[in-house]
Amino acid sequence: MEPIFLAYIGIGLLLALSGIGSAIGVTITANAAIGAMKKNPDKFGNYLILTAFPGTQGLYGFLGYFLLSTHLTPELNSLQAAAIFCVSIALGLLCIFSSLRQGAVGANGINAIGQGYDVFGRTMILTVFSELYPIVGIAALFLIGNSSIF
């Protein structure tokens, strides 16, 4: 097997995992928003913002591909391909788990807002905490992509 195939498998899994995580996370918060709108439809803007947060991890997956795409050449050696594969899997897993947990936190906040509690700002802050880990993963991907092995 050519090393570039391993790198592309990693990139493919990165895109799939981050996209699946975002889709599920957004669905979790959107379901909560639909339920909350029955009780408090005037807060739709708050629900919309909290629903969008888990979708960012899908963008991180695409950003990871974009940052690594310059290295995807036929001259890629086994070490380079392994590095791309491993960092892609790591970021993909960070994105999927972060999206799922972010969706859960956002859904709880949406439920509370729907019940009349004024927790939008606090929920935003708490929802963003899980965003830190994919950002750290992007930083690691960037550092590995710019390391001396390339």
Image (spheres, rainbow, N blue to C red):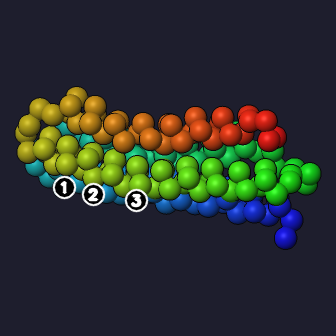
Mark 2 neighbour class, 10 Å CA radius: few under 14, some 14 to 19, many 20 or more? few
Q: Secondary structure at mark 3?
A: helix
Up/down of 141 relative to 10, above or below: above
Farthest residue in the bottom direction? 1
Mark 3 neighbour class, 10 Å CA radius: few under 14, some 14 to 19, many 20 or more? some
Whether residue 16 can be seen here: yes
Q: How many marks?
A: 3
Farthest residue in the top direction? 121
Viewport quadrant of the C terminus: top right
Query: Who's the residue at 53% across and 59% down the image?
Result: 17
Residue type at numbered disc 3: Ile
Viewport quadrant of the N terminus: bottom right
Q: Looking at the rendered structure, which numbered label has been put on residue 24?
A: 3
Q: Which residue is identified by label 1?
A: 35
Image spot of residue 61 (x, y percent):
58, 48
Residue type at numbered disc 1: Gly
Q: Can you tell which quarter of the image residue 74 is in? A: bottom right
Query: Who's the residue at 48% across and 50% down the image?
Result: 95
Give the CA distance from mark 1 to mark 2: 6 Å
Give the CA distance from mark 2 to mark 3: 10 Å
Q: Looking at the rendered structure, which numbered label has been put on residue 81?
A: none
Image spot of residue 113 (x, y percent):
14, 40
Up/down of 2 relative to 29, above or below: below
Whether residue 49 can be seen here: no
Are the residues tagged 1 and 2 within 8 Å (C-beta)? yes
Of 122 and 75, which appears nearest the observer?
Answer: 75
Q: Can you tell which quarter of the image residue 59 is in? A: top right
Image spot of residue 15 (x, y percent):
60, 55
Q: Secondary structure at mark 1?
A: helix
Residue type at numbered disc 2: Asn
Mark nearest the camera among 1 and 3 is 3
Q: Which residue is identified by label 2?
A: 31
